Image (cartoon, rainbow, N blue to C red):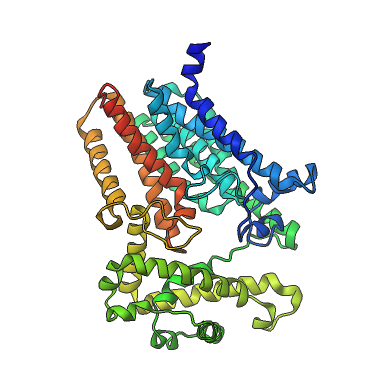
Amino acid sequence: MNITIKKNFSKIFYFFIFFLFFFHDEVLIQDTGSYIENIYKRPFLYPFIINIFELISATAFLKLLSIFQLILGYICLIYFSFFFIKKFNINNILYHIILIFTVAYPYLGISMKLGLTIFSESIGYPLILLFSVVFIKNYFFLKEVKGKKYFIFMMILLALMVLNKKTFLIVLPVILLGEIYNLFINKKIKFFLINVLIILTTIFLINIVERTNSYIKYGVFKPISVGGSSYLTGPFYLATDEDLKKITGDENRKIIQFALLSFKKDNMERNIISKSGNDILSYSKNNRKIFSNYYSQYVYMQDLFENKVSKHEFFGLDKKDELLARELSSKHCAQIAFQLIKLKPKENLIFYVTNIIYGMGGYFISRDDLRGFYANVGFAGFFILILQILVLLICVISLSKNTNKQLQSISCIILFFFVLNLINCLTTALFTPVYDRYSFYTFQMVFFSISLIFILFFDKKRI
């Protein structure tokens, strides 16, 4: 009995912590209502899960949902952590607790209350933890894999993740890289082509489900995209009034005039670059104030472009054409964004790259509801980014110079986590400041992998 308790102490320890959260109230945020109401832009899965719990109890469905999210999170993070603990024979209980903490962190109420919070991330995070283990089993432990069991499971998880949140399309590039890696190792072109066909089929089926979801909600058999409003915020934030005057297209100019009047009325500060003498490099170096300001303005701007501009009367449409108005708004916002980027390609590129750099290294967002855990950690916020670069270099060198199978496995796993994080930041930076809510999925894996390296080093110095 004592041996069993000792062996499973870390599982019991975290189960007790998660169990205590059952007695906390669920957390409702600004987006919660849009999931409950299943509005136009929400993918299929999370509103569907909410509906299931609503059928169970019309009054306590959110409480039941939060308990489900906590249970799912606990199971997936334990499965994720113990895959590595068993694979690398880590027996020290303290090391178990540390490793689990690095992925359990979002649940513990320090920076957010994942699980308790009613938003799609509470389902998405456990799914990507599960996906990561399946991916690693399928691609990095080839001799242990028989048949297509893990590959098919990975496609199911891909479908669930994308139907929960389209952000998870970020895993597609790493799946394709995994297939190319398999092709390089096995030299089986037929196997490669079949897998690519299965991936394309999965994407096709996801698209059909999304179209069906749109048809049920609005009677239109097509995916609904409103990404233009988010895409416009960065270029609009950088643009001068002179830049905005150069935009062509009647509807585009109408949107700009409406936005400028709204910004002036609400005393919203824009074009902070002018305070740096219009020097984009000086501007980007002042990252703390800039990106904190960008975030606060982003929320206002994105809401204006997505919700206030996209009214049927704005485009002279009937009330029944509200969905068309939103699509037109997104389309024209994207057009304005492309024109502004063409006017200032250098400034927009540096702004984008700076967003990625400080997103990967963790910059501080000065808001009470965003604690900025990934911020203010030495080297003016660059410490984590510098550490990632050093670890990446070590992994690349290890793969090219070392023949030790364990070291190669560790290097491949860490490269997977780091590349996934980079893709996430590259994608997120196109539409929004890279802050905790959008980056924690992959940041936690970076922290986990760095912790794993140190633990393996100190645990009998095995690396």
Q: x, y (%) of residue 4?
A: 51, 14
Q: Is residue 206 visible?
A: yes
Q: Is residue 417 visible?
A: no
Q: Nearer the viewer, residue 41 or 435?
A: 435
Check the picture and name the quadrant holding the C terminus. Answer: top left
Give me the residue at 48% from left, 12% from top: 3
Q: Nearer the viewer, residue 326 or 421?
A: 421
Q: x, y (%) of residue 57?
A: 79, 44
Give me the residue at 68% from left, 84% from top: 316
Quadrant for residue 126, please give it: top right
Give me the residue at 36% from left, 46% from top: 419
Left or right side of 212 for 176 = left
Q: x, y (%) of residue 169?
A: 50, 50
* Above/below status of 273 relative to 360: below
Quadrant for residue 202, please give it: top right
* Above/below status of 65 relative to 86: below
* Above/below status of 189 relative to 355: above
Give me the residue at 19% from left, 32% from top: 401
Q: Nearer the viewer, residue 382 or 50?
A: 382
Quadrant for residue 88, please give it: top left
Q: x, y (%) of residue 146?
A: 48, 22
Left or right side of 215 for 134 = left
Left or right side of 387 for 312 = right
